[in-house]
Amino acid sequence: MRLRLFLHGELETARLILRELVNASIGFEQRATLNALPSKSLPRMLSPSGNPGMFAKFRGILRSQSMGRCARNWEITRMEVWISVGLGLVLLLVGGELLVRGAVASATSLGVSPLLIGLTLVGFGTSTPELVTSVTAALNGSPGIAVGNVVGSNIANILFILGLSAVIYPMAVNPKGFRRDAMMMSAAAVACLGVVLAGRMGMLVGVAFLASLLAYVVYVYLQEKRAPDEAALVAEHRAQDARSGPRQLALSLAMAVGGIAITIFGARFLVDGSIAMAKELGVSDTVIGLTIVAVGTSMPELVTSVMAALRKHADVAYGNIVGSNIFNVFFILGTTSVIQPIDIPPQIAGFDIWVMQGATALLVYFARSGATLQRWEGWIFLTSYAAYTGYLISIA
């Protein structure tokens, strides 16, 4: 008996709720008619057999309300994705800048030479956004972002950033530094091609990449120490430009550590937002890594190169891009694969790595043919990058 009363009460409550739902969704005249009916007849009236017209209208109203709620939720989700990506990029830029300034100020306080600072700390520091992003993506199981970030950054560095810098102001190339650095940049590109075609990058390859970078930095430092040239002056100028951190060692170290922490948080936001964006847009995370992530993490190189071109210090812009491409392959891919082995996405192996090879070869050819990157050559770079980006969007 008690169970029966309980069920009866629950059923009556459900009927009242149904009445209120219908009242909220029909007109005044229909509402007056509906309220005159007993609650028991309400479910039968709203059934397909009881009143097909009322049933169809009520189902349409509920469906439209549900779709409206879904649309609003989708808009909120899409907004959150863009906020996550944008916030991640901002944090990466701020964290990388704090890291460079803090590390350079610390090294200066400890008596490290400007040449060594320019060759190591500035290069490593400006590559920190790409490094933390690739490592985070690899640990999250997103090799498309991890590898696409490096390949896409190298393509953007040459075709977009260097092209834009050359259009702003033609850049002369130091023959001695060009032979050494262009050879190493080409070797890095060929090494990257080899591991991409192999399909997987493990710890052994990563250690070999890091050893190659260490040998290159030591060789450059010893060579410039014995016979300084324009390349050494460029490295020293880069160190001086980044030396505006605090003079106290403790504060500069705190700035560097804070920069690392901010960079890690930024990478987390960027990677999570990029993965969600790829799912919402229905594209692979590789496309997002090759475009938005690659250009975003290359913002330090973009700002440095464009400012150098505006100040007519084109050699700084050229050295910045060449050094960044070397660091991206040997340092970022090397460190990432040591921490987490990477499976190479087929899209990168089938197309994008070849674009990177072509961009590298074109840069070497232009720089070697006239020892100067002219404005028309910069326009060729920019046009090529626009065509490449357009192709990625079209196939996505």
Image: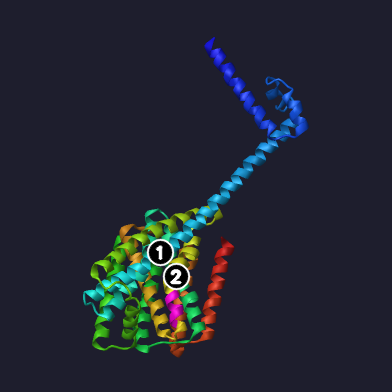
What's the residue type where badge 2 is placed?
Answer: Met
Label 1–label 2 contact, CB within 8 A: yes
The quarter in which the C terminus is drawn is bottom right
What's the residue type where badge 1 is placed?
Answer: Leu
- Kindly identify which residue carries mark 2: 299
Residue 210, image x, y percentages: 29, 68
The quarter in which the N terminus is drawn is top right
Range of magenta residues: 303-308
Up/down of 167 relative to 137, above or below: below
Up/down of 167 relative to 76, above or below: below
Q: Going by the image, does 345 lie left or right of 53?
A: left
Q: Going by the image, does 64 lie left or right of 156?
A: right
- Kindly identify which residue carries mark 1: 92
The residue located at (59%, 47%) in the rendering is 72
Residue 226, image x, y percentages: 23, 87
Residue 368, image x, y percentages: 43, 87
